[in-house]
Image: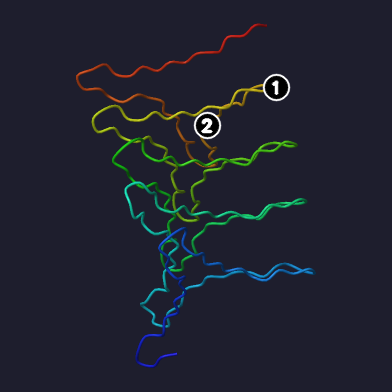
């Protein structure tokens, strides 16, 4: 501890080499033959000052050193299991008293050649039961309006903007393809929400059309 100064720093680093892959740094908790294995915790320091924040936690890979290489990847995975449910991955911000809750930002870095990177959110598959769900839900409020859910495609500065596709997968050898539901919630006092379906206005061109069709069948 320090009085009138900063606390000391702890640095863990692996020696540098001039050939081959650099050395690894492994932090591993203890195993157990009679109970759960030990935990690994990375916790930043708190602040006793009323106007100061707790410390940040940075997990990042180094920049690529050459034009031919890529920066290192980040992997967050739980282990496999032979009987039972595998471990969960929870990503959340803390609750706030007298302020707004923290945000979660998921973004792909920009590039100057080729396509932009993708964001792929896929629920788990199953060979013996229904596949997992993907749920996008905004926050509720006890005193005001609930949060919105926005889905928009990327803008094209020189060409067209991207499309937004909402569809169910094709059915297998037996069964039917999934149904699409577009509905607003009910209201106990007042009007229920409206459903708007429209195309944008056009300058020096025709407005977009709306097409509704029913698939063909053989019986």
Residue at image point 52% right, 31% down: 183
Q: Secondary structure at mark 2?
A: loop
106 lies left or right of 121:
left
Q: Residue furthest bottom?
A: 3
Residue at image point 49% right, 51% down: 139
Q: Residue furthest left?
A: 204
Residue closer to the observer: 216 or 87: 87
> Which residue does the numbered mark 2 point to in the structure image?
183
Q: Does 10 appear above or below 160?
A: below
Image x and y of residue 111, in percent: 32, 43
Q: Residue furthest front?
A: 19
Residues at discs 1 and 2 in contact (Cβ within 8 Å): no
Q: Secondary structure at mark 1?
A: loop
> Which residue does the numbered mark 1 point to in the structure image?
175
Q: Does 87 appear above or below 57?
A: above
Dot 2 alpha-carbon crowd within 10 angstroms: few under 14, some 14 to 19, many 20 or more? few
Quadrant for residue 174, please give it. Answer: top right
């Amino acid at each position: 501890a320090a009085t009138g100064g900063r606390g000391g720093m702890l640095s863990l680093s692996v020696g540098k080499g001039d050939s081959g892959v650099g050395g690894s740094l492994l932090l591993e908790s203890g195993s157990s033959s009679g109970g759960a294995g030990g935990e690994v915790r990375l916790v930043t320091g708190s602040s006793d000052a009323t106007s100061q924040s707790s410390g940040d936690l940075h997990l990042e890979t180094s920049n690529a050193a050459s034009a031919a290489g890529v920066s290192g990847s980040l992997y967050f995975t739980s282990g496999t299991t032979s009987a039972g449910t595998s471990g969960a991955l929870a990503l959340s911000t803390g609750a706030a008293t007298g302020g707004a809750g923290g945000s979660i930002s998921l973004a792909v870095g920009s590039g100057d050649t080729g396509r932009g990177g993708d964001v792929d959110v896929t629920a788990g598959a199953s060979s013996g039961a229904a596949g997992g769900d993907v749920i996008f839900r905004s926050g509720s409020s006890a005193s005001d309006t609930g949060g919105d859910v926005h889905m928009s495609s990327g803008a094209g500065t020189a060409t067209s903007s991207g499309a937004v596709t909402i569809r169910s997968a094709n059915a297998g050898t037996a069964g039917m393809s999934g149904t699409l539901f577009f509905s607003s919630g009910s209201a106990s006092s007042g009007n229920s929400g409206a459903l708007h379906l429209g195309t944008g206005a056009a300058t020096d061109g025709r407005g977009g059309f709306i097409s509704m069709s029913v698939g063909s069948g053989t019986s």
